[in-house]
Image (cartoon, coloured by chain):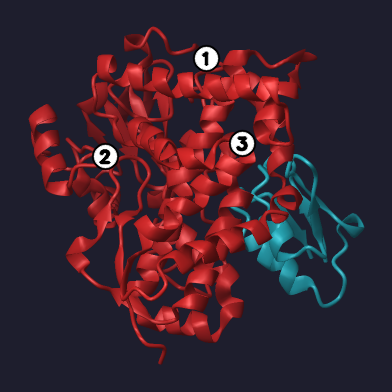
Chain colours: A red, B cyan
Amino acid sequence: MADIKDLETYFNEVYGPVADWMTDFDHANPAYNENAHALWDEMRDKCPVAHTTRYGGTWLPVTHEYVSEIAYDTDRFTSRSVVVSRMKPSLAPDMPPAPIGTAPPISSDPPFHHDARRVMLPAFAPKKIAAWEGDVRALCNELLDSVAGQEVIDAAVDYAQHIPVNVIARMLGFPLEDSDLFRKFVHDVLEGVDEPVHVRQPKFDRLFDYISVQIEEHQANPREDLTSFLLNATIYDQPLSMRHVAGSIVLLLLAGIDTTWSAIGSSIWHLATTPADRERLVREPELMPTAIEEFLRAYAPVTMARLVKEDIDFHGCPMKAEDWVLLPFPAANRDPKEFADADKVIIDREENRHSAFGLGIHRCMGSNLARLELTIAVEEFLKRYPNFELSDTAGVKWSNGQIRGPRKLPVRILPNK
Amino acid sequence: MRVKVDTSKCQGHNRCYALAPELFDVDDLGTAFVLNDGVVPDGLEAKARLAEKNCPEYAIVIED
């Protein structure tokens, strides 16, 4: 990936510099994720629904009330596409129509959504996921072993990014050596949002071509993994269509990778920059469950999106059919009307109704897996390195686009106090 | 004290089950349900309140 300076230049060439973040924001401009918390606070005071004409018209509500209202309103807002890009459905004739969409069930609307989701939920039930604990712990330790003895490690590049990729590849029964490719797919779909359709569509085609090869391999050699599970699954007493299987695999492959990687990275970033919290968590490891929920609240990585179905007035905002609406759950999580001391990270916060995994019918299906990976990744990192700090503040780079988290996170390992 | 899960609101975040497994369980689809007909045994009132205060969907109802 190009560095931040280049990306800024690039975005400015494509769309011109952001003139005003309230009326002309660009969520994929690197400055957005770098300054997200301050920007959302300012929008909450001034708007609270920001707007931009970019991407063909995009709205950004930042209060918990508005974000949840839209998340619950599947009549006026469709999930047909949940990544704001230049590829609107009317400009992308290959995009499958509602209510199924490209990657069911995340791209699906009721009533189909409910039935497609039921197929997959049992694979992600808490008791199923708990069985992965030992594997995830072993993986985290292997990764830590691989950089043992180094004074400076990149907690995003050397550690966080590998954890969810490795786990989902094993769950799907995909080759572990294709990890770099999976991260490229994630980058193409979630960060390459500013590209025109004729550039973006072929990247989706390559992703689906890869999935097709994996499906064929599983048809020839069925086994105990999620890919074979989907190939054997039924909906309305019929096997899932191949398009449905491939779309659901795309969802499983992409949705858990940079999201979890971001949550792990942001948590480590917080512990590197807040010695009091790090020392307390080392001293009182029983606080880990509330600390993890608080990191999920304060650094929630995922902003989802909807498309407006028909022209509506949303609290005074004239939303037009096929306008994008971003659903920044991370901003909702920092709304002082919903959370006491919303801007403070309180690792023993007792009451925490955060919506890091979304709200309503599209609640993240992988939330149990994400929590498991995040908890173990933070636990094992702290066990190995109770004392560390950022080695180079300017060296921290945040992602761009709807998934927010550190992509470079150089930390210096310090002697244990 | 009694607890209830409003299944029309529950979306399977599983927070209640994680925080108070003595009071809640979840089915294969992740939907929560109460144990012991929702009767909260003496001494577990604080856990019931904790579950209620951590449900993002406001699906847990406490009846004192």
**Vertical order, A13 against A320 (above or below):** below
- Residue A77 can be seen in this image: no
Instruction: Where is residue A16? Give x, y as percent.
Output: 8, 32
Q: Which quarter of the rendered picture does the C terminus of chain A lie within? A: bottom left
In primary-sequence order, the first of circles 3 and 2 is 2
Q: Quadrant of residue A106?
A: top right
Q: Secondary structure at mark 1?
A: loop
Q: Which residue is mark 1?
A: A98
**What residue type is disc 3 on?**
Leu
Say whether residue A118 is left or right of residue A108.
right
Instruction: Where is residue A79? Give x, y as percent.
Output: 48, 25
- Kindly identify which numbered label has been placed on residue A27: 2
Decide: few, some or many residues near mark 2? Use Cα within 10 Å; few <14, some 14-19, many ≥20: many
**Vertical order, B62 against A18 (above or below):** below
- At horizontal 44% and vertical 78% (from top left) the residue drawn is A385
Instruction: Where is residue A22? Give x, y as percent.
Output: 20, 42
In primary-sequence order, the first of circles 2 and 1 is 2
Labels 3, 2: one chain: yes
**What residue type is disc 1 on?**
Ala
Give whichever of A160, A174 is nearer the camera.
A174
Instruction: Where is residue B16? Give x, y as percent.
Output: 71, 58
Q: Quadrant of residue A215?
A: top right
* Disc nearest the viewer among 3 and 1: 3
- Kindly identify which numbered label has been placed on residue A172: 3
CA distance for labels 2 and 1: 25 Å
In primary-sequence order, the first of circles 3 and 1 is 1
Q: Which quarter of the rendered picture does the N terminus of chain A lie within? A: top left
- At horizontal 68% and vertical 26% (from top left) the residue drawn is A230
- Residue A217 can be seen in this image: yes
